[in-house]
Image (cartoon, rainbow, N blue to C red):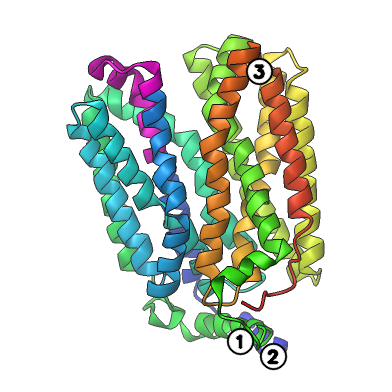
Amino acid sequence: MSTAINTAAAGQKTTVRWKIFFMMLFLIAINYIDRASLSVAMPLIAKEFDLSPTMQGLILSSFFWTYAFMQIPGGMLADRFKPRIVIAAATLFWGFFQAIAAVCTNATSLLLTRLGLGAAEAPIYPAGGKLNAIWMTQNERGRGATLLDGGAPLGAALGAIIITWLIGALGSWRLAFVVAGVGTVLAGIGAWYYIRNNPRDHAGVNDAEASYIEESHALEYSKEPENASGRTMDFFKYRSVWFMFFGWMCFNSVFYGLLTWMPNYLNKVHGFDIKQMGGASFIIFFSGFVGELVGGWIADKWKSAGASPNKVMRTLFGIAAVVATVSIFSVAYTKDPVTVVVLLSTTLFFLRWCGLFWCIPSILATRNKIGFLGGTMNLGGNIGGICVPIIVGMIVQFTGSYFLALMFFAAAGVGLFICSTGIDYEKKLPV
């Protein structure tokens, strides 16, 4: 079978699978730009709506309530209806909720649009994980996963710049929201036009590319357990699933913690002004984007050279967790602002190697359960997204310092190391 795959690989294959995942990178970047829009516009909205700090925090966090709640249902939708319609519909609906926020006149209506945005965006990652299993071979899924997840740091790097520019250019946060929403809807239409659930269904895929994918999948499917239980809840009997769940929670605890609190930290502790914070945030998060692509490339090249999945994944996750933990720990003891930016950039560069987590659903699950497992994993991550900004805020409020907050991030890095190196990356679960 491997000879057949190598023969197909030697032919002139089209590259539609890579174009699809560059499209997913674009969609996830839009996802994070739309999330960032409210944070950027909040000073204007708070003044216009006369919002208290408590209400501002409630509205900002409300996105994550429905986003986390809808992760598993979103994954199940991807399993049942296939990723194309789920990705396109999710993008269209979140563009609608992004745009409709422009007509809000009070806190209640704005909060409802954020709840809608969270629910609409929820299926995009589980469906993307399912798409990775359909379109990528086993030795390409690392790059597929990191292209999928790379939109997060890219969107975080670009989001504030783009939304701030739109508000300035249009003179209105409302018009900026409309433009962002319409742009998202157009991207959803483009996704429906280009993405397919099967390589053979895509007009741009030639026989060499389709055969290459199919032959790799046939080899993979031949290793699926024959005694699968079919009971979805049986996943939770396995250690690897729990390590996946809590490992992604630890990862997102660091990432969302930095995403939400890093600008304040740079301002309060190191005296960065608005322009300096914007430039530093771009450098730090763009470093994460570059690191994500590097991690995916190393993983696939190493596996293609014959290394076992356990050796590749545990080594890369272990290095990522150790370096990120040491870097974030060192920030707490560093007074020089430039060194702080370098250390935070190093943290994000290595931390984002963990975008490889989006390979795990296709590694552990049989083909009809990948969406569910991806949704389960992202539920864990977004529990971290809900809790960490609150925990960090309480630490800062009660201690008057960011030192223990940075120690909390370092502790999450240790948890990431334990969980990511404890997963068996070579065994499909009989579920």
Residue 429: x and y, percent? 67, 74
| Residue 294 visible somewhere in the drawing | no
Q: Is residue 285 rendered to the left or right of residue 51?
A: right
CB atoms at circles 1 and 2 under 8 Å apart?
yes
- The answer to if 177 sits in the magenta stretch is no
Q: Residues within 10 Å of mark 3 (few under 14, many from 20)?
A: many
Q: Is residue 9 rendered to the left or right of residue 411?
A: left
Q: Give amino acid for label 2.
A: Met
Residue carrying label 3: 402
What is the span of residues highlighted in magenta in the rendered image?
Answer: 34-55
The circle drawn on residue 82 is none
Residue 239: x and y, percent? 73, 62
Q: CA distance from mark 2 to mark 3?
A: 56 Å
User: Of callouts 1 and 2, which one flags the residue occurring earlier in the amino acid sequence?
Assistant: 2
Residue carrying label 1: 218
User: Of callouts 2 and 3, which one flags the residue occurring earlier in the amino acid sequence?
Assistant: 2
Kindly identify the residue that appears in the image at 70 percent across and 66 percent down: 238
Residue carrying label 2: 1
